Amino acid sequence: MENNFLGEFILRSLAEDLGDGDHSSLACIPAEKKGKAKLLIKENGVIAGIRVAKELFSTIDKNLKFDLILEDGTNVVPGDIAFYLSGHQQSILKSERLVLNIMQRMSGIATSTHEYVTQLNGLKTIILDTRKTTPGFRFLEKEAVRIGGGMNHRMGLFDMIMLKDNHIDYAGGIAKAIHKTREYLMKNKLNLKVEIEARSLDDVRTILSTGGVDRIMLDNFSIEETLMAVKEISGRYETESSGGINLLTIRAYAECGVDFISVGALTHHIKSLDMSLKAV
């Protein structure tokens, strides 16, 4: 499925950028003129988007030669060269901005994810992303999270049941939300994991007495409340901490014993990694 998404994404992105032609290049670069370029890294981080760049170049011009130097997931420093590209200059120029837009954002996400993962060295807790993503770009943002060492929470609304505060309130409470969900899954013969959000320790206790879930999300709990909740849950269900957790606090939450910590900032509050595609 992701390959289909990627191909369609590249075609849409090219249509958006090229319109009826790259007139800047067409105006001053002869069609037959060939050249070479390199992707130059200008900042410390984790590189991501190499496979996407290769596919994009092939879509623009199958005769472009792509010489790989660095793989996705490599730690990079200023001055590193990720790959060389050679072929028609017009094709290189057509691809320049789009490749940089994709790789800079993906690399920024991979770099940030790696920073969070590093904070949890020696602990069992896994870093998750969320659905706080860029529409149309989610599958690549989530790929970047994986490259950075994190795990994807879910791709969308279709591959996991997630009962959040509004679902619970609309359904008439925790117990009703869970019971209705189990009935829905049985009726439709669906095998989906069920996660439910707890907003307080009382919510945790209600969920425990109701049962029927796979994971409990401890939303906006303090570190002390998280520790108490993990003790009460006592391994009966997976646990996930979420809500405002950052690099300064994440290890303390993980040390409470939660299985997962989801961090929306991985994909919605990102500084792109600086790089450029330079003529050689």
Image (spheres, rainbow, N blue to C red):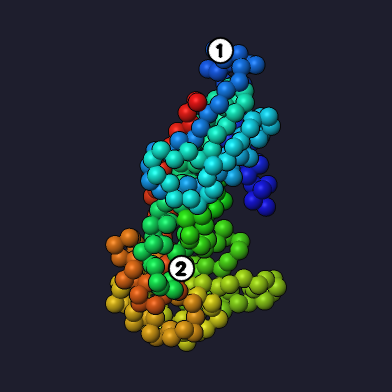
> In the displayed structure, does residue 107 sit left or right of residue 201?
right
Q: Image point 43% across, 46% down: which residue?
A: 76
Q: Residue at x 56, y 12 (%)?
A: 27
Answer left or right for 54 relative to 269. Answer: right
Q: Residue at x 32, y 77 (%)?
A: 225
The answer to whether 206 appears left or right of 72 in the picture is: left
- How far is mark 1 from mark 2, CA to CA? 52 Å
Residue type at numbered disc 2: Ile
Q: Position of residue 71 (x, y in %)?
A: 54, 48
168 up-or-down from 54: above or below: below
152 and 43: which is toward the camera: 43
Numbered tag placed on residue 27 in the rendering: 1
Asked whether the viewer can see residue 94, the reply is no
**Picture quadrant of residue 198:** bottom left
- The residue at the point 54 percent across, 42 percent down is 69
Crowd rating for badge 1 (residues with CA inside 10 Å; few <14, some 14–19, many 20+)? few
The reply to whether the C-beta atoms of the residues labelled 1 and 2 are less than 8 Å apart is no
Instruction: Give the x, y percent position of residue 45.
Output: 41, 48
Residue assigned mark 2 = 126
Q: Helix, strand or loop at disc 1?
A: helix
